[in-house]
Image (spheres, grey):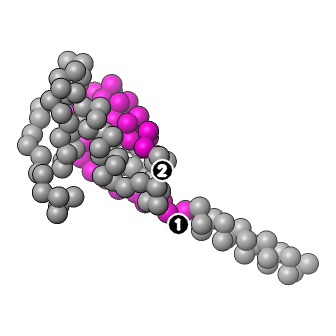
Amino acid sequence: MKLKMLSLMAMFLFGATAVFAGNKTESFKVFGNCGMCKSRIEKAAKSVEGVSTATWDKVTKMMEVTFDDAKTDVTKIKEAIIHVGHDTEKLKASDEVYNNLPGCCLYDRVDVNPDPKQE
């Protein structure tokens, strides 16, 4: 009976470790203004396969994402966000997509650092 219990415990611990082993949490800046921006930004991030959580704070402009690093990476998440019109600190959305955002979502754009070494 003891052996069965120890075996079950070991299998449980191994399984739990395997589930959380690939999860990684990263934070980065995303520009936006309002609740509609928050919805759009979080939805774009969550649309990337492997992203489990995405939370954007409209006051600090900081995005926190948790993702499986075996399925995706931060660059893919940022690319999904710029495709819906929101700049990050390193990547810039196209002017066409940005200009199609609702008026309340048109944030002040800043130059982004295109240096890939700092990504």
User: What number is the disc on residue 21?
Assistant: 1
Neighbourhood count class around disc 1 (C-alpha, 10 Å): few under 14, some 14–19, many 20 upward = few
In this rendering, which labeled residue sits more in front, label 2 or label 1?
2
Left or right of 25: which side holds 63? Answer: left
Q: Quadrant of residue 41?
A: top left
| Residue range highlighted in magenta | 20-48
Residue beneath the point at 79% across and 76% down: 7
Q: Is residue 104 visible?
A: no
Residue position for label 2: 50
Residue beneath the point at 33% across and 25% down: 36
Q: Quadrant of the N terminus?
A: bottom right
User: The residue under label 1 is which amino acid type?
Assistant: Ala
Q: Confirm or deny contact between disc 2 and disc 1 (CB under 8 A).
A: no
Q: Quadrant of residue 103?
A: top left
Residue 42 versus residue 67 in the image, above or below: above
Left or right of 85: which side holds 50? Answer: right
